[in-house]
Image: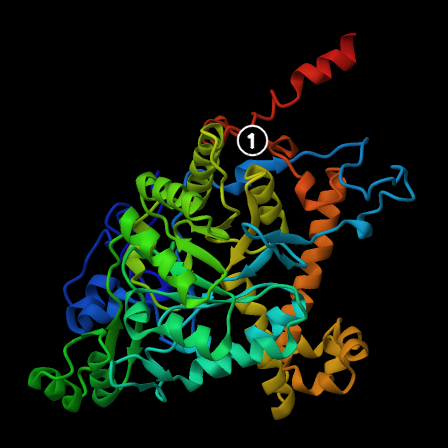
């Protein structure tokens, strides 16, 4: 059984000519001399490295479509007809008190001081890609009014057109970063926070020092990697001048914009874009602990870490080092992940998939705890989009996992709301929207709720943010229903016992009991005693 068909995908704008395709290579069974396209090999023959990336850049997000043998769909949620865990102290469990709408979906993370969130989800890293920049206002305000954490990804300062450096090559002014932080803070109500990520280039430019001194941020996030790729972050730029500027700031830019052959290819029209790449990090325990101390000396009281779908050795490093450093949150991002720009072959073919990676993390966390060490609060990332799978991840990861990081799943509502706003202004609502109404009040089911809460400030909330809020309210209600059905009325009461594995393989990987064995002894005691 093939888990993925290579050589053609909508993400890269490619397709097979033939209906019959060799499974392992993705090449048409009858490759015709004179074919006019357009598989990946065909397109790569004259567009080369461009075909590595999903496109068009800045207008899409992409998620790999490899069909892994086991994922969270191989688990089901247990439902019960008795009991009620997590009700407020002193509350008697009965049909009048144990109602799904009273389920508490709040969570928190942190070593000493918890950051509260109204929901156990937060955004993926929205960094230097164009799609993150143009949608930032919608994402930031949407996260703030929903009461969840927002992650400002790597390289934001480094690609800022208005960036100013001091005599030592450190950031003295970054209008883009200032704007991003201000927008989130404008509507933050004490739930969630903004996390600014740092990679190699961010460290060299002094991003941590800048956001600490100018914005007095409590928290900074170190980045080891992500689930979508095992190299540094990339974006594309469309002018040689901009490419040269980024190269001078310390980035790797390919093709080299300062070389005559690149400039000639751009003038000829063959070369249309330059790639800006970040460097690979090199993690050592000594270096990590020194960086933690340095960041605390700068003034950060809280430090989080984001790591990717590396081998289980790097997972062990993240957990052990994070425990010793007393970090506030470790986000573990499984393959294949989603992205604004990552190499398409890498997205599909590298790294430990999310379900497997979380299973390993749970096993490692238990071993650390048995050793007498405290496990930092954990979050899982990598392909989440709805409340049933988030429930499964939190239950399977109990008691260590406090939240799930959602990338594309939280970006989509922001883009939908933003586009509805544009269509309304242009008087060009598609039928898929207009069937619900022709005004904002009619279209957005939560709009009146927000108007009542924010009054005249509602005019400052873009419809992309309303879209995110509306989605999170659906998510909250759906999660409340699932939790009530499993008789959990607070997130901390979730446990691995609330799940069953539908396949033996899923049970072997996760340690969740197989459906025909889960609670079998209890059932027999009830049946036969």
Q: Residue furthest right?
A: 96
Q: Please state which of residues 289 and 441 is positioned toward the viewer in this rendering.
A: 289
Horizontal and vertical percent position of residue 404: 54, 52
Q: Please state which of residues 289 and 262 is positioned toward the viewer in this rendering.
A: 289
The answer to whether 93 appears left or right of 256 in the picture is: right
Horizontal and vertical percent position of residue 447: 75, 76
Considering the image in quadrants, where does the N terminus appear? Answer: top left
Q: Please state which of residues 407 and 76 is positioned toward the viewer in this rendering.
A: 407
Q: Quadrant of residue 33?
A: bottom left
For the point 39% across and 70% down, the residue is: 208
User: Can you identify the residue that label 1 sits on?
Assistant: 501
Horizontal and vertical percent position of residue 291: 34, 58
CA neighbours of label 1 inside 10 A, class few (<14), some (14 to 19), many (20+): many
Horizontal and vertical percent position of residue 146: 66, 67
For the point 52% across and 56% down, the residue is: 405
The answer to whether 345 appears left or right of 302 in the picture is: left
Residue 51 in view of the camera: yes
For the point 50% across and 39% down, the residue is: 374
């Amino acid at each position: 059984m093939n888990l993925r068909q290579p050589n053609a995908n909508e993400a890269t704008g490619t397709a097979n000519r033939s209906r019959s395709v060799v499974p392992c290579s993705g090449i048409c069974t009858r490759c015709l001399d004179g074919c006019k396209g357009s598989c990946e090999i065909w397109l790569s023959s004259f567009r080369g490295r461009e075909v590595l990336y999903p496109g068009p850049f800045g207008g899409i997000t992409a998620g790999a479509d490899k069909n892994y043998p086991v994922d969270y769909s191989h688990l089901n949620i247990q439902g019960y007809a008795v009991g009620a865990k997590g009700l407020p102290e002193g509350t008697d469990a009965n049909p009048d008190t144990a109602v799904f709408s009273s389920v508490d979906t709040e969570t928190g993370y942190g070593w000493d001081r918890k950051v509260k969130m109204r929901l156990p989800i937060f955004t993926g890293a929205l960094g230097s890609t164009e799609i993150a920049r143009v949608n930032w206002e919608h994402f930031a305000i949407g996260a703030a009014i929903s009461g969840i954490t927002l992650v400002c990804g790597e390289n934001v300062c480094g690609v800022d057109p208005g960036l100013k450096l001091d005599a030592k090559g450190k950031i003295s002014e970054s209008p883009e970063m200032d704007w991003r932080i201000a927008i989130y803070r404008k509507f933050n109500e004490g739930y969630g926070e903004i996390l600014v990520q740092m990679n190699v280039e961010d460290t060299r430019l002094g991003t941590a020092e800048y956001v600490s001194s100018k914005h007095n941020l409590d928290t900074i996030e170190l980045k080891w990697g992500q689930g979508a790729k095992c190299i540094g972050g990339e974006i594309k730029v469309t002018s040689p001048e901009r490419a040269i500027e980024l190269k001078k700031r310390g980035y790797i830019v390919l093709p080299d914009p300062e070389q005559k052959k690149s400039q000639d290819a751009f003038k000829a029209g063959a070369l249309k874009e330059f790639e800006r790449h970040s460097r690979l990090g090199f993690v050592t325990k000594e270096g990590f602990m020194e960086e933690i101390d340095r960041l605390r000396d700068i003034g950060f009281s809280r430090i989080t870490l984001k790591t990717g779908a590396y081998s289980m050795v790097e997972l062990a490093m993240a957990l052990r080092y994070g425990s010793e450093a007393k970090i506030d949150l470790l986000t573990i991002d499984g393959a294949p992940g989603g992205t604004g720009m990552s190499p398409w072959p890498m997205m599909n073919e590298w790294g430990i998939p999310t379900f497997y990676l979380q299973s390993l993390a749970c096993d490692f966390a238990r071993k650390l705890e048995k050793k007498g060490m405290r496990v930092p609060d954990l979050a899982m990332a990598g392909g989440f989009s709805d409340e049933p799978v988030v429930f499964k991840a939190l239950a399977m990861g109990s008691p260590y996992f406090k939240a799930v990081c959602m990338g594309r799943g939280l970006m989509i509502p922001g883009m939908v709301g933003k586009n509805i706003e544009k269509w309304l202004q242009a008087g060009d609502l598609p039928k898929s929207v207009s069937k619900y109404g022709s005004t904002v009040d009619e279209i957005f089911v939560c709009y009146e709720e927000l108007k009542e809460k924010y009054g005249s400030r509602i005019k400052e909330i873009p419809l992309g943010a309303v879209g995110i809020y509306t989605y999170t309210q659906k998510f909250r209600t759906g999660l409340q229903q699932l939790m009530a059905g499993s008789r959990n009325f607070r997130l901390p009461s979730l446990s691995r016992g609330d799940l069953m594995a539908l396949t033996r393989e899923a049970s072997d990987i996760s340690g969740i009991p197989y459906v025909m064995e889960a609670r079998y002894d209890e059932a027999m005691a009830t049946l036969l005693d």
